[in-house]
């Protein structure tokens, strides 16, 4: 019968990283889960088994616009029922031509994504008769391709954190122990022996080569600055889109973002110092931004030198390095500033002009971020919460509790609503949004708790945060869109001003460097002024332009998972039933209409 191309098995168990044991949801038993490589322009089927006896699961393919496979987006209750315990679900991945780049997959249920994630690389098609570079299908040449996956490590369990978020007053999830690099990390003050579970990740390189490092920010909370001792690099990709090369010494990475950089390693001569010794190890360092505690974490860029005693024989990102974390940290990583990468206007442009900005949006949809803490924690976009919220945040339940039956939380297999997409597909009258109402009301149809867009419409989305409390405080929010990439038009401090921002865009786009906004899938809403140890002032904006592509039901949400699960998510319905039935995977979709996939049983 049907044979999937890839199989992932998700389980919960004790794992050890950063010299600490923690009960974690993991894919194929490891953190991170296995890297998956799939070709662009082709369909790959991934079978996901939920081996957890008591938790729901979905897997989202972050950044892949699942335009021809909307049932496989992995957003629980938006595109599918969660996969119940001991069931599997077949996901159809169909990355469009031209989408070769860096992505990742993660659970979209509860806080499972803290550890249940892995790299997803979309590869170029290989063409037989062309030059070496082209035959690999790349606009840039490099010798080696290395994934550097960053994830958060906490010393409490997801269950404990979720429980705290459901309390009134809430208990925050806490701060990270470290940002793991390829699942590895070590505390500066640790006295344990260096092992795989208690040591720094090593990125092994040879002198005089060009490496493509794919930084994949799979954290659920951390937002970092990153640098490598004595090495600059050149950004060539952001969120799956090639950029014109941009030289920098530092990256700023928000949860859900990916950047590829080209790093030219030093030659042997450059590694030799005047006194004849050779330095072959350089720290990669990350420092968390915008949290009450600054957390600094490390990995090692390690040169494999002729005659060195290294036992590593392959370019394995999982190899372990005997070096201990340095103290004090060797790199000064700048905090965000107005001039910093990815602020007001992105400093880089796409390499391909096929992504030129459509000039006129049909309308501008404002999403106002608001925060309620009394008695329960609730983050919202326009005070909108999706209709699967059974009991709107009231005196009696938090959003998190209301997304399921109290007292069980969303991680548990209690599902009593039909996913939007399934409802649309089935043509159930009561779930079809009234598009006229929606268009006149900021795109929002409160009957169904969703924003609706006609297929093909171009809109601007302005996300505005407003400070709260006596000091006009704010927080950072990595904003992520499913289903399509948006043109990232920039961000700023204060209240968005259309005339001023339009003028700035026009000036920049009319300039000699041919600047055009990048298409991204995750960009930051900052707070400002930015300081490391405070929450700063909170009135800021970010503006996107989006072409509603293919019919489906897509989420727009904050990628700080603890914000997402207390309400900072919105549902966007593109097209209607008539559009959706035209999606050419009807056969597969029929299976999707059954509850969360097939059982494989206990037997
Ligand atoms: Cu990576 Cu809906 O998220
Ligand atoms: Cu947020």
Image: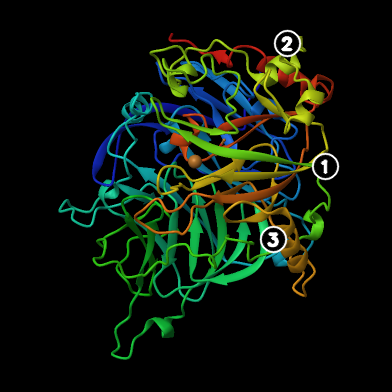
The residue sitting at 81% across, 56% down in the picture is 354
* Res 351 seen here: no
Q: Are marks 3 and 1 in contact (CB under 8 Å)?
A: no
Q: Earlier in the sequence, mark 2 or mark 3?
A: 3
Question: Disc 3 marks which residue?
Answer: 138
* Residue 467 rendering spot, x and y as whole percentages: 49, 46
Side (left or right) of 258 relative to 66: left
For mark 2, does the 10 Å Cα neighbourhood hold few (<14), some (14 to 19), or many (20 or more) residues? Answer: few
- The answer to which quarter of the image holds residue 224 is bottom left
Q: Is 464 or 251 nearer to us in this picture? A: 464
The residue sitting at 49% across, 65% down in the picture is 337
**Which circle, 3 or 1, is nearer the viewer?**
1
Question: Disc 1 marks which residue?
Answer: 362
Q: Residue furthest front?
A: 470
Question: Disc 2 marks which residue?
Answer: 430
The residue sitting at 76% across, 27% down in the picture is 438
Q: Separation of disc 2 and disc 3 at Cα?
A: 48 Å
Q: Indicate whether 348 appears above or below 198.
A: below
């Amino acid at each position: 019968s049907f044979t999937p191309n890839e199989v992932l098995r998700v389980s919960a168990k004790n794992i050890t990283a950063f010299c600490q044991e923690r009960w974690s949801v993991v894919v194929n038993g490891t953190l991170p889960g296995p890297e998956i490589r799939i070709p662009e322009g082709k369909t790959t089927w991934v079978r996901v088994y939920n081996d957890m006896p008591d938790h729901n699961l979905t897997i989202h393919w972050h950044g892949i616009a699942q335009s021809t496979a909307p049932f496989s987006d992995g957003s629980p209750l938006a595109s599918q029922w969660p996969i119940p315990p001991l069931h599997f679900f077949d996901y159809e991945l169909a990355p469009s031509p031209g989408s070769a780049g860096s992505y990742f997959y993660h659970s979209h249920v509860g806080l499972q994504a803290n550890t249940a994630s892995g790299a997803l690389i979309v590869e170029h098609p290989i063409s037989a008769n062309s030059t070496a570079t082209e035959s690999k299908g790349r606009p840039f040449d490099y010798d080696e391709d290395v994934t550097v996956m960053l994830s958060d490590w906490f010393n409490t369990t997801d269950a404990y954190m979720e429980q705290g978020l459901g309390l009134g007053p809430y208990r925050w999830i806490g701060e990270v122990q470290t940002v793991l690099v390829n699942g590895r990390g070590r505390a500066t003050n640790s006295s344990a022996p260096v092992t795989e579970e208690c040591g720094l990740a090593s990125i092994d390189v040879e002198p005089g080569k060009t490496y493509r490092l794919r930084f994949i920010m799979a954290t659920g909370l951390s937002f970092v600055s990153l640098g490598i001792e004595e090495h600059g690099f050149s950004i060539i990709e952001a969120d799956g889109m090639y950029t014109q090369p941009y030289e920098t010494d530092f990256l700023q990475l928000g949860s859900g973002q990916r950047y590829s950089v080209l790093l030219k390693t030093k030659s042997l001569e450059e590694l030799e110092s005047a006194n004849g010794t050779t330095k072959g190890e350089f720290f990669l360092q990350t420092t968390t931004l915008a949290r009450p505690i600054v957390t600094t974490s490390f990995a090692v860029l390690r040169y494999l030198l002729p005659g060195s005693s290294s036992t590593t024989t392959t370019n394995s990102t999982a190899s372990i390095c005997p070096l201990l974390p340095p103290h004090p940290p060797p790199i000064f990583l700048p905090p965000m500033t107005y001039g910093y990468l990815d602020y007001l206007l992105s400093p880089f442009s796409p390499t391909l002009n096929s992504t030129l900005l459509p000039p006129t949006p049909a309308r501008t949809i404002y999403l106002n971020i608001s925060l309620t803490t009394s008695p329960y924690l609730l983050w919202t976009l326009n005070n909108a919460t999706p209709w699967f919220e059974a009991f709107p945040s009231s005196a009696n339940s938090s959003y998190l509790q209301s997304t399921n039956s109290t007292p069980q939380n969303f991680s548990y297999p209690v599902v009593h609503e039909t996913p939007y997409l399934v409802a649309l597909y089935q043509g159930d009258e009561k779930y079809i949004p009234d598009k006229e109402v929606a268009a006149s009301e900021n795109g929002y149809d409160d009957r169904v708790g969703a924003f609706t867009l006609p297929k093909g419409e171009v809109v601007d989305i302005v996300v505005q945060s407003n400070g709260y409390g006596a000091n006009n405080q704010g927080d950072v929010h990595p904003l992520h869109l499913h289903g399509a990439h948006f043109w990232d038009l920039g961000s700023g401090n204060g209240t968005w001003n259309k005339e001023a921002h339009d003028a700035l865009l026009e000036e920049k786009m009319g300039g000699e460097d041919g600047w055009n906004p990048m298409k991204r899938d995750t960009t930051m809403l900052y707070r400002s002024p930015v300081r490391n140890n405070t929450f700063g002032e909170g009135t800021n904006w970010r503006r996107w332009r989006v072409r509603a592509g293919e019919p489906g039901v897509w989420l727009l949400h904050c990628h700080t998972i603890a914000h997402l699960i207390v309400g900072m998510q919105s549902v966007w319905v593109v097209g209607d039933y008539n559009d959706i039935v035209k999606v050419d995977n009807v056969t597969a979709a029929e299976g999707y209409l059954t509850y969360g996939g097939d059982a494989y049983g206990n037997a």
